[in-house]
Amino acid sequence: MSRRAVLLVNLGSPASTSTDDVRTYLREFLNDERVLDINPVMRWALLEGIILRKRPAESAAAYAKVWTDQGSPLVVMSEKVSEKLKTSLGPDTPVYLAMRYGQPSIASIVGQITADGIDEILLFPQYPHYAMSSWETVVVKVKEEIAAQKPAIKVTTVQPFYQDADYIEALHSVAAPYLEQDYDHLLFSYHGLPERHMRVADSSCAHCTIVPDCCTIASPAHATCYKAQCLATTRELVKRAGISSEKYSVAYQSRLTKEPWLTPSTDKELERLPTTAVKKLLVICPAFTTDCLETLEEIQMAGCESFLEAGGTSFQQIPCLNDHPAFIDFLAKRVHLWLASNP
């Protein structure tokens, strides 16, 4: 009988808040051809000549604001999720955790899986939405490492779950206590991407950013369209929560390069909304399953400060799914479906 296991993979984190460790992390992250998808020589020049000279110190200062006694918030919380999923599944289905960048690396965990005699794995990228710079790079890296270390291991991959009913229910379970409060507006802040990534991911080369209102017109391209999937998550959650159309909006955060990115930008919206009588704001970040630098420092700290300085009076970031029981139940249910479909 084959031995089966689950492999959770999240983004990753620097080893510490030191500038050197952050530089090492950013070098690995930004040298990924699916993150900075430009000519390798240009990517090297951009990284070594510009980005890695100044950005590591700035990012290190940001990480220091959110770092815990146990370490990186993303890694610590991902470990809690992994342990709770282990408990839920029981001893017959091992759960492994890896990070796409940093430690524990995918290579090291695949080595552990191999040493443990695992024959089949359910690869569960911790990204609800498809993007080549997140979901795809995880899948490709895991498969590369398995091909190099033990090609006989069978891999089944959980597809982006952006509108899965159980995922939406988990989001609603976390958000509900906040939505019951008095608020003026709910801002959905998704991680940003270059607009060009939408076109690259569209195999038809004839829909994304080409057809007017491309995200609202049904198309096979939506299977790999990050923006269309973000908007689908938004539609499903506001439907589940009964939020009226005038009480929410969507924006995109964490812009990196100067080329056109998805708009509107979250930072600009946080400055604009108080001028439209929005004084009490809730922000939710569904692209992240785990609170991390982008939610804790960029939204909860810097975003809050920006909104209040622009005239807002109340700002709350709704936590990510983290280790909420509803999210653990969602993960466990998907694993059980896999086990049942492959007895």
Image (cartoon, rainbow, N blue to C red):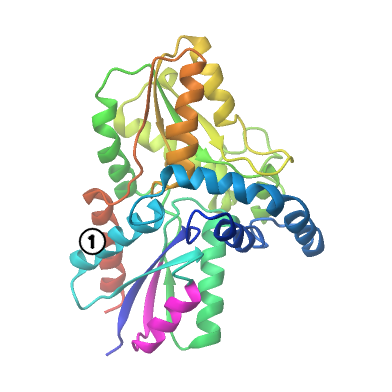
Q: Residue beneath label 1, please?
A: 84
Direction from residue 174 to residue 260 in the image, left or right = right
- The quadrant in which residue 71 appears is bottom left
Q: Is residue 287 visible?
A: no
- The quadrant in which residue 285 appears is top left
- Residue shown at 44%/51% (left/top)? 128
Direction from residue 238 to residue 255 in the image, left or right = right
Choose between 335 and 30: the one closer to the eye. Answer: 30
Direction from residue 155 to residue 144 in the image, left or right = right
Q: Quadrant of the C terminus?
A: bottom left
- Residue shown at 65%/44% (left/top)? 256
The picture places residue 75, in percent across and down from the top left corner, at 39, 58
- Residue shown at 62%/32% (left/top)? 263
- The quadrant in which residue 207 appears is top right
Choose between 241 and 18: the one closer to the eye. Answer: 18
The picture places residue 261, in percent across and down from the top left corner, at 66, 39
Taking the magenta stretch, the answer to whether it contains residue 91 is no
Under tag 1, what secondary structure? helix
The picture places residue 286, in percent across and down from the top left corner, at 42, 42
Q: Is residue 317 visible?
A: yes
Above or below, 31 against 321 in this view is below
Find the magenta span and give its range.
106-123
- Residue shown at 62%/40% (left/top)? 255
